[in-house]
Image: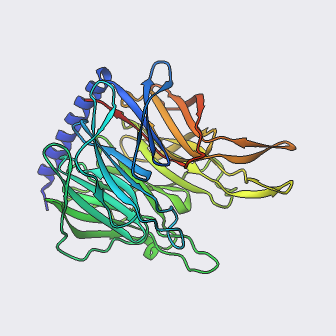
């Protein structure tokens, strides 16, 4: 366990690094990547013009599930799989791969690096530790985490053997190391009850992390995890606060990040994420979460792809698909909903805020028939671009780029500032 003095020094270092990165972002080029099925597309990003322009595409061994840049911003890691999302009876697939790329510092064009590594099952999330020495991969079914050592050239090395049997909960959804890099947090969503199966509990699992080895440290599961379905988390850039999207309950939790890398047992705050929480439609859930680079606003998506019958067709049920913005009290960590911006698409699974904090791009995963008066129209999948208000962080929709998802869903999108 580290002392409060040591923790303060680590946070101060993280703040300094964050300021340096913010300064670099002001002069370095930022690009946007998005994935449809196995195809990963690179877009040039015009922040001032709030515009994207397609530059190049790259094929992965299977459908892209998630991606993450190296802290040096020289390398890029992608997990892909032909397994289907959902767990349970969903097809498991037989191709699950972790691939490494070198990023061209001027353009973001990707060049394969080393030998892709086979993975044990469908990966759902991937990240790189703060020191840039390991890749951590989370799996949903069975819930699991693997750690791969990174070679000096950025390529993926061998998997790190774990020294104890670990409890990875049910339906792992995200794995990240804390700012001090001394612990790793696995968010496990659990599953809602069905007509055939009782609810699976959710939990937040905290592990000590040293030389790629994980050891159980803490499990947070209020109500034994029933009625608690966390999906993703993000760390405040300068304060010891962790913000967690609670998918299955449409909530936002805030925890204190303690000096030893664990979380407060009880949340500091619990908030509803929906614009109209009294009118929750079936299939409604909270999505991914990101904090604005200035630490004053936290964004998360509300997602719904549920359908109802209309004129003999299945059409969208009218639930919420939007980006919710919460202002963050810098003294208490309390988030307050300041507004929601319509997503102009179905299921905003991923989104990203550019490092300058002026632009947000959200990726909707699928087209869906929608009702427009007495007509049925199709709302396309796409990339929705928003300007971010200076100071208040409020979102103003600028444009949407339609994306053809005939060959697969648009499952991931994110920004990278180049070295």
* Viewer-closest of 185 and 153: 153
Picture quarter with the C terminus: top left
Q: Position of residue 183 (x, y in %)?
A: 22, 59
Q: Is residue 402 left or right of residue 187?
A: right
Q: Position of residue 45 (x, y in %)?
A: 43, 26
Q: Is residue 216 left or right of residue 357?
A: left
Q: Is residue 295 left or right of residue 280?
A: left
Q: In the rendered image, is residue 287 in sight? A: yes
The image quarter containing residue 171 is: bottom left
Residue at the (18%, 40%) spot, across then down: 12
How are the colours assigned in the image? Answer: rainbow
* Viewer-closest of 277 and 132: 132
Residue at the (34%, 56%) spot, across then down: 97
* Viewer-closest of 242 and 384: 384
Residue at the (48%, 33%) spot, across then down: 360
Please determine whether, in this image, residue 33 is positioned above or below residue 78: above
Please determine whether, in this image, residue 163 is positioned above or below residue 78: below
Residue at the (72%, 57%) spot, across then down: 307
Q: Is residue 379 left or right of residue 395?
A: right
Q: Position of residue 220 (x, y in %)?
A: 36, 68
Q: How many marks?
A: 0
Picture quarter with the N terminus: bottom left
Q: In the rendered image, is residue 261 in sight? A: no
The image quarter containing residue 101 is: top left
């Amino acid at each position: 366990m580290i002392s409060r003095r040591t923790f303060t020094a680590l946070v101060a270092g993280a703040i300094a690094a964050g300021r340096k990165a913010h300064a670099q972002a002001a002069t370095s080029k930022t690009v946007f990547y998005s994935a449809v099925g196995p195809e990963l597309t690179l877009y040039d990003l015009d922040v001032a013009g709030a515009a994207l322009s397609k530059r190049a595409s790259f094929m992965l061994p299977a459908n892209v599930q998630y991606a993450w840049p190296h802290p040096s911003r020289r390398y890029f890691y992608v997990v892909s799989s032909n397994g289907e999302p959902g767990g349970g009876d969903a097809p498991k697939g037989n191709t699950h791969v972790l691939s490494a790329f070198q990023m061209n510092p001027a353009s973001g064009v990707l060049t394969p690096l080393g030998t892709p590594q086979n993975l044990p099952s469908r990966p759902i999330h991937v990240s790189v530790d703060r020191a840039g020495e390991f890749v951590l991969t989370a799996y949903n079914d069975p819930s699991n985490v693997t750690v791969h050592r990174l070679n000096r050239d950025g390529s993926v090395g061998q998997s790190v053997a774990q020294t104890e049997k670990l409890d990875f909960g049910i339906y792992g959804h995200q794995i990240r190391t804390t700012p001090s890099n001394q612990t790793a947090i696995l968010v496990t969503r659990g599953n809602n009850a069905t007509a055939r199966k009782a609810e699976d509990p959710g939990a937040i699992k905290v592990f000590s992390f040293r030389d790629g080895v994980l050891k159980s440290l803490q499990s947070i599961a209020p109500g034994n995890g029933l009625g608690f379905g966390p999906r993703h988390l993000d760390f405040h850039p300068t304060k010891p606060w962790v913000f967690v999207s609670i998918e299955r309950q449409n909530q936002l939790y805030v925890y204190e990040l303690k000096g030893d890398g664990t979380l407060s047992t009880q949340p500091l705050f619990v908030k509803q994420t929906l614009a109209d929480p009294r009118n929750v439609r079936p299939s409604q859930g909270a999505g991914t979460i990101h904090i604005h680079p200035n630490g004053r606003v936290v964004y998360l998506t509300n997602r719904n792809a549920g359908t109802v019958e209309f004129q003999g067709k299945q059409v969208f049920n009218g639930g919420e698909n939007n980006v919710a913005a919460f202002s963050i009290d810098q003294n208490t960590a309390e988030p307050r909903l300041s507004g929601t911006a319509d997503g102009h698409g179905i299921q905003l699974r991923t989104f990203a805020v550019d490092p300058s904090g002026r632009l947000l791009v959200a990726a909707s995963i699928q087209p869906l028939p929608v009702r427009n008066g007495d007509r049925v129209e199709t709302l396309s999948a796409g990339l929705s671009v928003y300007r971010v208000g200076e100071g208040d962080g409020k979102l103003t929709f600028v444009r949407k780029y339609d994306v053809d998802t005939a060959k697969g869903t648009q499952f991931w999108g994110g920004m990278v500032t180049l070295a």
